[in-house]
Amino acid sequence: MDGSELGGFLRSRRARVRPADAGFADGGRRRTPGLRRAEVALLAGISVDYYVRLEQGRGPRPSAQVLTALGRALRLTADERDYLLRLGAPPPPERAAAGPTSPRPCGGSSTGSTTSPPSPSTPATTWSPGTRCSSR
């Protein structure tokens, strides 16, 4: 997550929302257009300090629930909400080095030969990741 990009997006969308549209009294003169940070935090159900840190790019990675609440508070479109969720999404996991990804299932061998399937008269062998082979 690039905190500065998330913060810039939140600031720009906050400036678009008129206080009257969000249910707040105009309250006279405002230094900047749009909602105050405290008003966004109140609408989203988060602390003002946390919202300020997000907007300044200093906060921890927000959860999907927080981002969804911010999207509602800022009256985002579906595309803007998706973009907000992508901005706050965790990075994809790193890929592991090439090689076997799981142990061989029961009955297999490292030489590539396999055993014949169990017959109805013999017990079936079960296997799941992280367990040892066992008979039923």
Image (cartoon, rainbow, N blue to C red):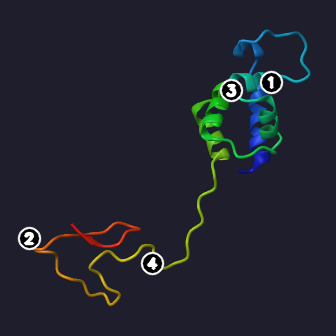
Q: Find disc 3 in the rendering and name its residue.
A: 44
Mark 3 to mark 1 CA distance (whole Å): 10 Å
Query: Is any part of residue 74 visible from this angle?
Result: no
Q: Residue at x 63, y 56 (%)?
A: 91
Q: Find disc 1 in the rendering and name its residue.
A: 38
Q: Tag 3, which secondary structure?
A: helix
Residue 127 lies in quadrant:
bottom left
Structural crowding at the residue carrying mark 1, measured as other residues with C-alpha within 10 Å and reported as few (<14), some (14–19) or many (≥20)? some
Q: Is residue 49 above or below residue 75?
A: below
User: Contact, CB < 8 Å: mark 2 with mark 4?
Assistant: no
User: In percent of the image, x 41 and y 68: which residue is there?
Assistant: 130
- State the residue at coordinates (61%, 33%): 68
Q: CA distance from mark 2 to mark 4?
A: 32 Å
The residue at which mark 2 appears reads as: 120
Q: Which residue is mark 4?
A: 100
For label 1, the SS is helix
For the residues marked 2 and 1, what is the alpha-carbon distance in whole angstroms?
70 Å
